[in-house]
Image (tube, rainbow, N blue to C red):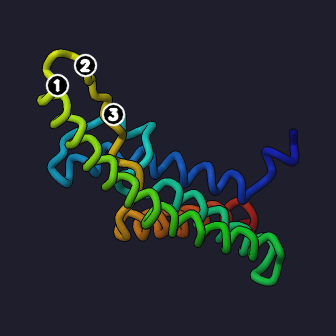
Amino acid sequence: MEKLFGNTPLWAAFIAFVLAQAIKPFTGLLDGKGWNMRMLTTTGGMPSSHSATMAALTVSIAMVEGLGSHLFAISFVASLIIMNDAMNVRYETGKQAEIINKWSELLSEIHKNGAFSPENLKTMIGHSSLQVAAGALLGLITGSVFTYFREFHV
């Protein structure tokens, strides 16, 4: 258990994730969508918590293990895959869900006898490139500051 609590990269990633999720309700205020507490526990939105988590993990591993370590290489490649997925695959999935929801509403209007009852799909699944970049920046800052004070500050 002591090794778990002493795992600096793990804690850097966890802190970045919590910070990113905590910021999301506030960014809703800035972009005119209003305050939404559900953003604390959902995917999508500004900033990307996936990007923040992976960037913090990767920079912390780089600082603790070195840029030449296998752990850094694995974390770096996984970060790129996850950020690409958030920006492209999951973002497009959200766009498709919007279209399916519109079709679903149209079908429910056509079949007013109750033969069709729509269930809306979640549309905020992925991230824009700005949301991914903001998450990555948050993760880089969080990971480097936390790791510096935990590992190197005397």
Q: Nearer the viewer, mark 1 or mark 3?
A: 1
> The N terminus lies in which quarter of the figure?
top right
Q: Which residue has dot 2 on it? A: 115
Residue at x-position 61% and y-position 68% = 79
Q: Position of residue 77 (x, y in %)?
A: 67, 73
Label 3 element class: helix
Q: Is residue 24 visible?
A: yes
Label 2 element class: loop
Crowd rating for badge 2 (residues with CA inside 10 Å; few <14, some 14–19, many 20+)? few
Question: Which is nearer the eye, 78 or 139?
Answer: 78
Q: Position of residue 89 (x, y in %)?
A: 46, 62
Q: Which residue has dot 3 on it? A: 37
Q: Position of residue 6 (x, y in %)?
A: 80, 50
The residue most toward the bottom is 68
Q: Is residue 145 visible?
A: no
Q: Is residue 31 left or right of residue 4?
A: left
Residue at x-position 37% and y-position 70% = 129
Crowd rating for badge 1 (residues with CA inside 10 Å; few <14, some 14–19, many 20+)? few
Q: Amino acid at mark 1?
A: His
Label 1 element class: loop
Q: Are marks 1 and 3 in contact (CB under 8 Å)?
A: no
Compared with residue 141, is residue 104 higher up or lower down, i.e. above or below? above
Q: Quadrant of residue 67?
A: bottom right
Q: Amino acid at mark 2?
A: Ala
The residues tagged by marks 1 and 2 sit, at their Cα atoms, a distance apart of 6 Å
The residues tagged by marks 1 and 3 sit, at their Cα atoms, a distance apart of 35 Å
Question: Which is nearer the eye, 15 or 44?
Answer: 44
Question: Which is nearer the eye, 88 or 18?
Answer: 88
Q: Earlier in the sequence, mark 3 or mark 2?
A: 3
Q: Quadrant of residue 127?
A: bottom left
Q: Which residue has dot 1 on it? A: 111
